[in-house]
């Protein structure tokens, strides 16, 4: 099973990818992670990518395609793949088709976690964590049982991510829409796009994804 999982920051894509990796023994292929790993390992593609990045240029589609091809070649044929951050353009979508065909695979599903932007802003801007133990909280959905006191360790120090503010969240949403807009029509035309309510509970979204993979 080979899928593309789409969703804006805060939609739960990371959580659901982790569930798919654990429960379905899939591999998540993130272009950013693959680039860093290849550079660190000093593979031929990694050295090429490092030279490009050191010049301040964007890594080409050819380099990313080589990374994906190398990863697919190194894994067993029955290992499912989640593509993360790729493709983002029509050209990349074409390249992915060619890579998958070379490895005897095909793209089975493109799944988009849909969100309500205003509700997502509230979800993200309300997040905070214990500065001591890292326990996660939310202003309205999951506040500490005793205001100002961590349930887990009793600390009274909390922190918020500096980018968890409304302007940043809305900018990330706009960027997501701009990047996914070019590829969704391609896959819609093939009839392989399924949209899931990303505002549902984690367990409900997991159930929906499991049903899609089982179909």
Image: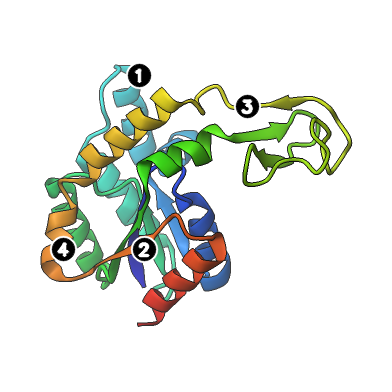
Marks 1 and 2, how far apart at CA: 39 Å
Q: Position of residue 35 (x, y in %)?
A: 40, 38
Q: In the figure, is residue 118 to the left or right of 189?
A: right
Q: Are marks 1 and 4 in contact (CB under 8 Å)?
A: no
Name the secondary structure under disc 1.
helix
Q: Residue at x 13, y 48 (%)?
A: 90
Q: Are marks 2 and 4 in contact (CB under 8 Å)?
A: no
The residue indicated by pointer 3 is 160
Marks 3 and 1, how far apart at CA: 32 Å
Marks 1 and 4, how far apart at CA: 37 Å
Q: Name the mark nearer the viewer: 3 or 4.
A: 3
Q: Residue at x 10, y 65 (%)?
A: 189
The residue indicated by pointer 2 is 196
Marks 3 and 4, how far apart at CA: 38 Å
Q: Residues within 10 Å of mark 3 (few under 14, many from 20)?
A: some
Coloring applied to the structure: rainbow
First in sequence, mark 3 or 2: give its number.
3
The residue indicated by pointer 1 is 54
First in sequence, mark 3 or 1: give its number.
1
First in sequence, mark 1 or 2: give its number.
1
The residue indicated by pointer 4 is 188
Q: In the figure, is residue 128 to the left or right of 203?
A: right
Q: Quadrant of residue 209?
A: bottom left
Q: Name the mark nearer the viewer: 3 or 1.
A: 3
Task: Classify 80 as above or below 152.
Answer: below
Of 68 and 18, which appears nearest the observer?
A: 18
Task: Residue at the far right: name it.
Answer: 154
Q: Name the mark nearer the viewer: 1 or 4.
A: 4
Q: Position of residue 215 (x, y in %)?
A: 35, 82
First in sequence, mark 1 or 4: give its number.
1
Of 68 and 51, which appears nearest the observer?
A: 68
Q: Name the mark nearer the viewer: 1 or 2.
A: 2
């Amino acid at each position: 099973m080979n899928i593309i999982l789409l969703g804006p920051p805060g939609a739960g894509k990371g959580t659901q990818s982790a569930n798919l990796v654990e429960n379905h023994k899939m591999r998540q292929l993130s272009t950013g992670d693959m680039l860093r790993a290849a550079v660190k390992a000093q593979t031929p593609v990694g050295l090429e990518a490092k030279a490009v990045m050191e010049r301040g240029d964007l890594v080409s589609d050819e380099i990313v395609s080589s990374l994906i091809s190398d990863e697919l070649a190194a894994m067993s044929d029955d290992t499912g793949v989640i593509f993360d951050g790729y493709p983002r353009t029509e050209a990349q979508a074409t390249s992915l088709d060619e890579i998958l065909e070379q490895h005897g695979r095909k793209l089975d599903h493109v799944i988009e976690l849909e969100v309500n932007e205003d509700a997502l802003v509230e979800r993200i801007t309300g997040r905070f964590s214990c500065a001591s133990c890292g326990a996660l909280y939310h202003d309205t959905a999951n506040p500490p049982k005793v205001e100002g006191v961590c349930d887990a360790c009793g600390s009274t120090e909390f922190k918020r991510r500096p980018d968890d503010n409304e302007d940043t969240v809305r900018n990330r949403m706009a960027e997501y829409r701009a990047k996914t807009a070019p590829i969704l029509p391609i896959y819609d035309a093939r009839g392989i796009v399924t949209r899931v309510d990303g505002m549902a509970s984690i367990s409900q979204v997991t159930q929906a994804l499991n049903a899609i993979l089982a179909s």
